[in-house]
Amino acid sequence: MFNKKPAYRVAVVGATGAVGAEMIAVLEERKFPVETLLPLASARSAGETVVFQDQDITIEELTKDSFAGIDIALFSAGAEVSRKYAPIAAKAGAVVIDNSSAWRMDKEVPLVVPEVNPHDLEHHGNIIANPNCSTIQMVVALKPLHDRVRIKRIVVTTFQAVSGTGKEAMDELMDECRDLLSFRAAEPKVYPYQIAFNCLPHIDDFLPSGYTKEEMKMVNETRKIMGDASIQVTATTVRVPVYVGHSEAVNIETEQKLTANEARALLSTAPGVILYDDPEHKIYPMPLDVAGKDDVYVGRIREDESIPNGLNLWVVADNLRKGAATNAVQIAELLVR
Ligand code: A2P
């Protein structure tokens, strides 16, 4: 249950981070009814300020007492912080919308993309999980197709921006570019190898199977959000030297035939999707154009000629926005509606 009010006391945990900063911006932009904003981060940032609605608001250190009187807590400070503090916030009466991977596959925790499974918000124990960025943009694009012709199998390769790793990774890409263009060696710290002018087929830890945790998030979260455990998903996730905006090459096999034109027609009216598909005029989505936008952009729709019922799509979204902050704020909007 959620008590509706004219305005809410909202905490943002990880307020200095790449996603936390975007959460604060999106709350303001979408005019979410905020009575007070409480930015929380580590002791390192306590005393610094963030700007919200033209006011400087002081960042406080996250402690177990931070959540007294808070209605909604948006978390984006990593899984360890979420595992420890989300239950504390939930017990204090706040509804937590958690951007980390900590609670996503917990049976008691809804994993929600508002365009896909808003009904899953009906039952929660004060913790709601925001899915993985790559999964969010893929399911927004695929749900309308799944509803029409049932997707049996998804093969996806991602091209993920460094902002998904956080602000230190964004600095690392900038520093490496500067060093390399000045004929100095790159000094990777966040990533195992140089990311500038490179691609790393390695996001999150490797599992004994050889897949990474990021790849398995796409498999498991897609099934949970779509409410269909029978969808087969296989993923290869790749970090690329892009600041903001994840791209995905998605191949689907469907139960019934869907032509490329039928898919375009469905996606042209789908919630949260912008169809951007006119190759003749060089119209296709790219991260540079999609950064800063809240929708999921889809282009390069083609029938897969190697199987009877298959399609290829190119799906791009701002990973900090629809992949994280916007999706979290949209969940909060559904709660208070
Ligand atoms: P801080 O800036 O004080 O370290 P990003 O994902 O962009 O790297 O950001 C991570 C966010 O999580 C930052 O706001 C960071 O705050 C915050 N954070 C990291 N560890 C903790 C912690 N132990 N307690 C509270 N906030 C944390």
Image (cartoon, grey):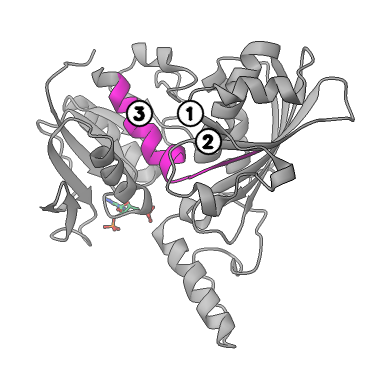
Secondary structure mostly seen in the magenta stretch = helix
| Residue in front for this viewpoint, 141 or 21 | 141
Residue at x-position 37% and y-position 40%: 325
Q: Upstream in the sequence, badge 2 or badge 1?
A: 1
Residue corresponding to mark 2? 296
Whether pointer 2 and pointer 1 mark residues with C-beta atoms closer than 8 Å, the reply is: yes
| Residue 321 as seen in the image, left or right of residue 279 | left
Q: Amino acid at mark 3?
A: Gln
Residue corresponding to mark 1? 272
Q: Upstream in the sequence, badge 2 or badge 3?
A: 2
How many other residues sit within 10 Å of disc 2, few (<14), some (14-19) or many (≥20)? many
Total numbered labels: 3
The quadrant in which the C terminus is found is: top left
For residue 58, which quarter of the picture? bottom left
Give the label on residue 328, or none: none
Q: Nearer the viewer, mark 2 or mark 3?
A: 2
